[in-house]
Amino acid sequence: MGKKKSRQWLDIQIYRKNPVLTVLTVIITAGLILSLAILGVRNKNEWGRDRRELLRYWEEGVYGDVYALSGQWLTKKPLDFFLLSLRGFSAYQLAVAQINASNTLRYIDDCVVSLRKALLTREGEKDANLRYVLGKAYYYKGASYADLATQYLEEARSRGFRAPDIAEYLGLAYAELRDYRNSVAALSEALDSEDGSYVSDLRLLAIARSYIGLGEGNSARAYLVRCIENSLDANVVIQARLLLGRVLAEAGETDEAEEQFRAILDENGDNADAHFELGELYEALGDGTRARAEWRRALRINPVHGEARAKLGMYAP
C-alpha cells in the first residue's frame, strides 16, 4: 500500500515540476473532450435530420420509405421509441393497402412486433396511440386474436384516446368473441357518432349480427332492412337478406322469409346459401321433397357446401 501511495505522490510531483507536460496534458484532455462533444453534437444533428426526414415522409404518406428507413435505423437503435413507433404505424398503413391477404398479414405481423417493443420503452408505457393501432392490428390478425384487439383498444380508450373508428373496431372484435352485449353497446356508440349523412353498411350488418347473437331478432330487423335499402355492395345485401330471411323464418313469417331468399336468386342469379336456406324453410314446413331439391341445387353450385351435404346425408337411404 505504501509503495502505491509513493508512486502516486511521485507522479504528482513530476507533473508539478514539469509545467510543459502539465500544459500538454491539459491541452490533450481538453481536445479529447472537445472532439467528443463535437462528435456528439454532429451525431445528434444527423439524428435530428434523420428524424425530420422520417416525419416528412410520414406526413407525405410515403409509408414504404418510412417502413424501410425505420427498419434500417433500428439495426443501430433497436429500442428507440420513435423508430419503433413509425415502423409499426407505417407497417399498419401498408397492410391495409394490400390486396393479397398474405402480404397484409406479413405487414400486420411487423406492426405488432414493432409496437409491442415500443410499449416496453419508457415513452410507450403510457402511449394511447400505440395501443389503438395495436388493437386494430390484432383485429386484422383474425378471430383468434380478438381478445387482444379488445384489450388494447379498451386500454387506448381508458387513457383518453378518441378516434372515429375505435368503437366500431371494438364492436366487431367483441362480436368475434361472441360477447354480443358489449358488441351492441360499442356498435351503437359508433352509430350515434355518425353525422347522419352516411352510415357504413358493414356496421349495420355487424350490429344486426350481434342482436341475433343475443336472441333479439326483432331488434336486428331494422338494421338489416336499412342495410338492404342503402348498401351498394351486392355481397353485403346478400348477407343482409340471408340474415333477415332466417330471422323471419324463426318468427314464423315463412312467406316473408321466402321472399328474401328468392330476392337473392332474382337479383344475383344462383346462390348456394339462398338455395340452402330455402331447403331449411321447406323442411320446417314439412315439405322434404322440395327441401332436398334445394339442397341439391346448393351442392351443384358449391360442391363443398358442408351444410347442404350434411342435410342430404340425413335423408340418404
Image: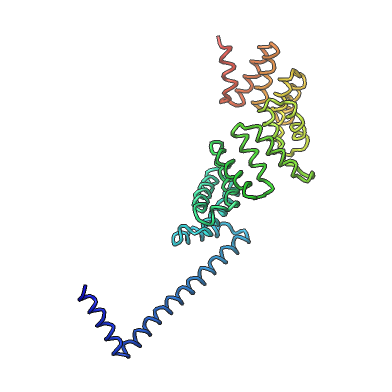
Instruction: Name the residue nearer the viewer: 164 or 158.
Output: 158
Q: Which corner quadrant of the image does residue 204 belong to?
A: top right
> Farthest residue in the top direction?
317
Label count reads 0
In the depicted view, which residue is nearer to us: 276 or 145?
145
Residue 96 locus on image (x, y percent): 60, 48
Residue at 59% across / 46% down in the picture? 155
The residue lying at 47 percent from left, 59 percent from top is 74
User: Which residue is at 21% across, 75% downward?
Assistant: 2
Q: Above or below — where is 311 with respect to 17?
A: above
User: Split into 4 quadrants, where in the image is the N terminus?
Assistant: bottom left
Give coordinates of residue 49: x percent, y percent.
54, 69
Instruction: Give 284 or 152, whichever is nearer the viewer.
Output: 152
Instruction: Please state, as top left, top right, bottom left or bottom right, where the C terminus lies in the image.
Output: top right
Q: Is residue 32 left or right of residue 139?
A: left
Q: Find the residue positioned furthest to the left.
A: 3
Quarter of the image holding residue 34? bottom left
- Residue 111 location in percent, x, y? 53, 50
> Quick check: 238 above or below 18?
above
Q: Please state if 133 lies on the left or on the right of 231 as rendered.
A: left
Colour scheme in the image?
Answer: rainbow
The residue at the far right in this view is: 197
Give the residue at x 45% y 75%.
39
x then y, percent, for residue 26? 37, 84
Task: Please determine whether, in this image, residue 172 is positioned above or below residue 216.
Answer: below
